Amino acid sequence: PSKAPDLVRSGFDRLVVKAGQTAAWLVCVAMAISVYEVIMRYGFNSPTSWVHESVVMLVAVSFCLGGPVALASNRHIRVRVLYDTVGPRFRLWLDRFNDLVTFGFCLGMTYAAYVMFWGASHNPMGDWQLERSGTSWNPPFPALIKGMILLALAIMCIQSLIHLYQSLKGKPAPLPDDEGAV
């Protein structure tokens, strides 16, 4: 079997992919505690108050890290109609444009996530106070998830800046194989 091409563009991207592979196990943890809940609820008539919110938080964290991993491994959705019809020199200019737009978008989204996290982590007086779910268990998961969104977007901002630097230096983005190309 042929090995898929390595689409990772930098050492930072490699770290992101490794962290993403580790964080992917959060889905298995979420599944395991969901099974625990089903057994406790229907087997022992003793439902939990913490499983649902914990599962939502674990899956949300895993989902947040999907963006940086997709960007790191260069396996995000792309429309290659123009890209495939031009030569390598023009492709490099398209890479530069794409990397610049991606950086600008990630920078704006990181700022928006910062504003959202600040509101979830500070009370109106400006003191540290994590937003809570408001349920009987009342964990600070809403604030933590918003913090993960901020972290994921900050990582993507760094990645896109590295990618922009690389494309400005003349290093083209690696191309995935044509399977699944749009």
Image (tube, grey):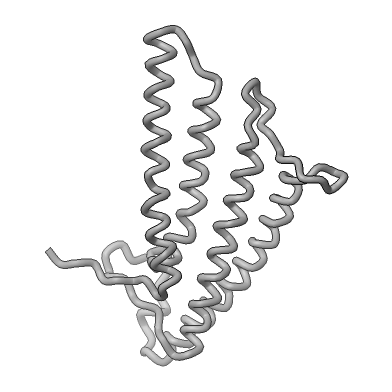
Instruction: Tell me if 46 is positioned left or right of 5 in this view.
Output: right
Rendered location of residue 115, percent (x, y) = 73, 55
Rendered location of residue 37, percent (x, y) = 43, 20
**Observer-nearest residue: 62 or 94?**
62
Work out which residue is located at the far right of the displayed protein and give it.
125
Rendered location of residue 93, percent (x, y) = 48, 87
Asked which quadrant contains residue 42, the reply is: top left
Against 148, residue 40 (above or below) is above
Rendered location of residue 15, percent (x, y) = 42, 65
- Identify the residue at horizontal 48%, vertical 33% (top origin): 55
Work out which residue is located at the far left of the displayed protein and give it.
1
Labels in figure, total: 0
Instruction: Tell me if 11 is positioned left or right of 145 in this view.
Output: left
- Identify the residue at horizontal 63%, vertical 31% (top origin): 139
Q: Quadrant of the C terminus?
A: bottom left
Against 26, residue 173 (above or below) is below
Asked which quadrant contains residue 154, the reply is: bottom right
Q: Quadrant of the N terminus?
A: bottom left
- Identify the residue at horizontal 87%, vertical 45% (top origin): 125
Work out which residue is located at the far top of the displayed protein and give it.
45
Against 148, residue 154 (above or below) is below
**Observer-nearest residue: 1 or 141?**
141
Against 28, residue 177 (above or below) is below
- Identify the residue at horizontal 15%, vertical 67% (top origin): 2
